[in-house]
Image: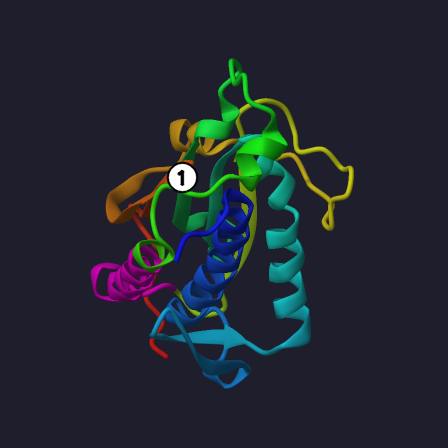
Amino acid sequence: MMISRQDLINLLLDFIEVWIHQILYERELYPTAIFSLKKKYDVPVHMATHEGVANYISKFVESLQTLLISGNCKFISLKIMSPMNNRILERFVFEIESALNESNLDIPLDTILDSEVTCSLADIQQQLRACLLRTAGTRSSLVNNPSDCTFTLGVETYSGPPSSTHQQIDWIPTQSDQQESQQHQRWNHIIPIKTIPMDLFKINVFVIEAMKKGKHVSR
């Protein structure tokens, strides 16, 4: 089954939302009781049912649509923060290389979005399924975090801050991932999760773990 490139963007947004929920479950950011077991791409996934958490993630993902359409979305990241000093302990990264950010595109954007993708829906779903499975598999490669960690969602653009027009979330400027990596933050290692080719997009998914996470608190 073939789909349009606009459908591809919608599919990618849907996946990012599931991916965020799954990370929150795998890294134990909330009690397991607030998660509901569902199935996506024939993979069991855990989705947070707490209204505040679910709405926050949903609004964040909705706000990415304009950035994806314009090709201005470089990194999407979920950062897990220490409860003691707000230091970043882990950064799950969704790096996006987009053909839509080419300044010399001579085809109207609407025409591109209405055209069919060059890969089948089944192929795309297989790639997304593998990414979810490998994201869950990172648990065994990461050191446990302290209890009561917090998290933040962020996006880095290629050019300028995200526009507030039609956005569902108030963006707060922060340091870029590169700036944080260059300043005071020492990393233990990078764990590649999956490279996903998706027609207009090439996506690299990985997690970076801090060098020291502090005293381990068992759950």
Locate the N terminus by quadrant: bottom left
- Magenta stretch: give its range: 125-145
**Which amino acid does the dot numbered 1 rest on?**
Glu
Left or right, residue 2 beside residue 155: left
Residue at horizontal 45 percent and vertical 80 percent from the top:
38
Q: Which residue is mark 1?
A: 95
Residue 152 percent coordinates (x, y):
55, 52
Which class describes the residues within 10 Å of circle 1: few (<14), some (14-19), or many (20+)? many
Colour option used: rainbow
Residue 120 percent coordinates (x, y):
35, 52
Residue 89 percent coordinates (x, y):
39, 51
Residue 192 percent coordinates (x, y):
25, 47
Q: Is residue 158 above or below residue 116?
A: above
Q: Is residue 144 above or below residue 91?
A: below
Q: Is 144 part of what is drawn in magenta?
A: yes
Left or right, residue 81 beside residue 217: right
Nearer to the camera, 53 or 158: 158
Q: Secondary structure at mark 1?
A: strand
Provide the major secondary structure of the magenta segment. Answer: helix
The answer to whether residue 83 is seen in the rendering is no
Residue at horizontal 40 percent and vertical 48 percent from the top:
91
Residue at horizontal 47 percent and vertical 64 percent from the top:
18
Q: Is 62 part of what is drawn in magenta?
A: no
Q: Residue furthest bottom?
A: 33
